[in-house]
Amino acid sequence: MTAPVVIVGAGLAGYNLAREWRKLDAETPLVIVARDAADFYSKPMLSNALAGKKTPATLVMKPAAKMAEELKATIRANTEVAAIDTVARTVTLVDGEVLAYRDLVLALGADPVRLPLLGDGADDVLSVNDLGDYARFSERLESARQVAILGAGLIGCEFANDLLAREIKPTVIDPAAAPLSRLLPPQAGALLAERLTDAGVGFRCGDSAQRVERVGAGYEVVLESGARVPADLVLSAVGLRPRTTLAEAAGLAVARGVVVAASLQTSVPHVYAVGDCAEVAGLNLPFVMPIMQQARALAATLAGTATPVRYPAMPVLVKTPSCPTVVAPPVAGEGEWQCEDVEGGLIARCISAEGGLVGFALLGAATKERQALVAQLPAWLA
């Protein structure tokens, strides 16, 4: 009997790879091992689900049983992999069962970064990284009127904007001078903060959370400056760390993520990595479009046609309706940001030393320039 392709992880990366591969190979056995219920949903929708009045149940697009039927797959839900033997080509599950594989794909995702907070409320800080997290978060929101958000990055800003739809006052705390400091130049970050502030978001930029203390039925976030931010709920959105522990224990090369070549193969034959856990040719890009590029390329490789992944320039849509924002960060090399105020928005261009466009950020009405500027960008991975 042919050993199956085994995919560890049932998020966007794992399921989209399975779908693409099944278009090319309908017969080879497929096993998907998932640490959660393995229902299919779009993780990026979690940060704007409140405005859409989505519940945890309505976020599920297809239950695991339906996915198993469509993919002709065996899906092992609520199951974790304990170890990988790359010589024997097996994975051992936590219950002791051993699965042989023809090829193994790690689609492990990433875990929320946790700040080293002090205080008796530190353990109550929530993160939203999957459907179960969202269920717990939305339940706690029923009695909330103000939420402190730690981190003014992509997810922090998106959740802040989304909370406004529930008439909940968000206060975003970040040590950087402006939101999205890793993606936007200061002038663009300042405009984003201004537009979100006008919509009702509070910002405490240039300050960092040190403690979370319980006060009555709520909390106070104590900042480095000594200021206190009251909140009914505290949400941490300070970033993600690729899950690499399993790969490292199996002897695979690991840096920020699981190291893979453009082929998406790890340092060991017949083992691949995709999605948030993968560091592809030095790039760890936890966005939807890179994942889709990976899925199509690896599907072809697993079906017998070696296909390296290619990344065209792929702008990221920031889900902040109060200030529509599109950013294409300069992933290959540095450049100098040049900002131009336009009617109703701002265009920021990142220009290389050679004078070429290597990135851009568009805010407000300027987002209509997206297609024209994308055409000028070099590929992220050629």
Image (spheres, rainbow, N blue to C red):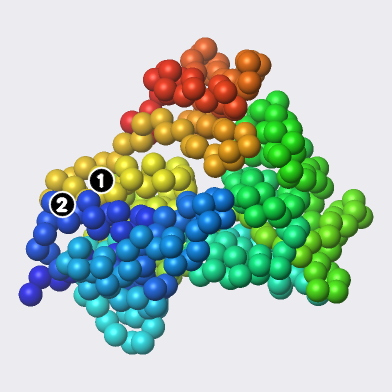
Which residue appears at 79% of the width and 52% of the height? 208
Most distant residue in the top direction: 355
Q: Which residue in the protein does label 2 denote?
A: 23
- Using the image, determine if residue 111 lies above or below residue 208: below
Q: Work out whether residue 153 or residue 171 is closer to the camera in this orientation and state it.
A: 171
Q: Residues within 10 Å of mark 2 (few under 14, many from 20)?
A: few
Which residue appears at 61% of the width and 59% of the height? 113
Q: Work out whether residue 51 or residue 378 is closer to the camera in this orientation and state it.
A: 51
The percent coordinates of residue 4 (x first, y second) are 18, 69
Which residue appears at 42% of the width and 55% of the height? 42
The percent coordinates of residue 95 (x first, y second) are 36, 87
Mark 2 or mark 1, whichever is nearer to me:
2
Q: Work out whether residue 317 or residue 14 is closer to the camera in this orientation and state it.
A: 317
> Residue flagged by tag 1: what amino acid is it?
Arg
Q: Quadrant of the N terminus?
A: bottom left
Q: Which residue in the protein does label 1 denote?
A: 296
Q: Residue 89, can we see it?
A: no
Which residue appears at 50% of the width and 37% of the height? 317
Q: CA distance from mark 2 to mark 1?
A: 10 Å
The percent coordinates of residue 153 (x first, y second) are 63, 45
- Using the image, determine if residue 244 lies above or below residue 340: below
Q: Quadrant of the C terminus?
A: top left
> Residue flagged by tag 2: what amino acid is it?
Lys
- Using the image, determine if residue 199 lies above or below residue 216: above
Most distant residue in the bottom direction: 96
Q: Secondary structure at mark 2?
A: helix
Q: Secondary structure at mark 1?
A: helix
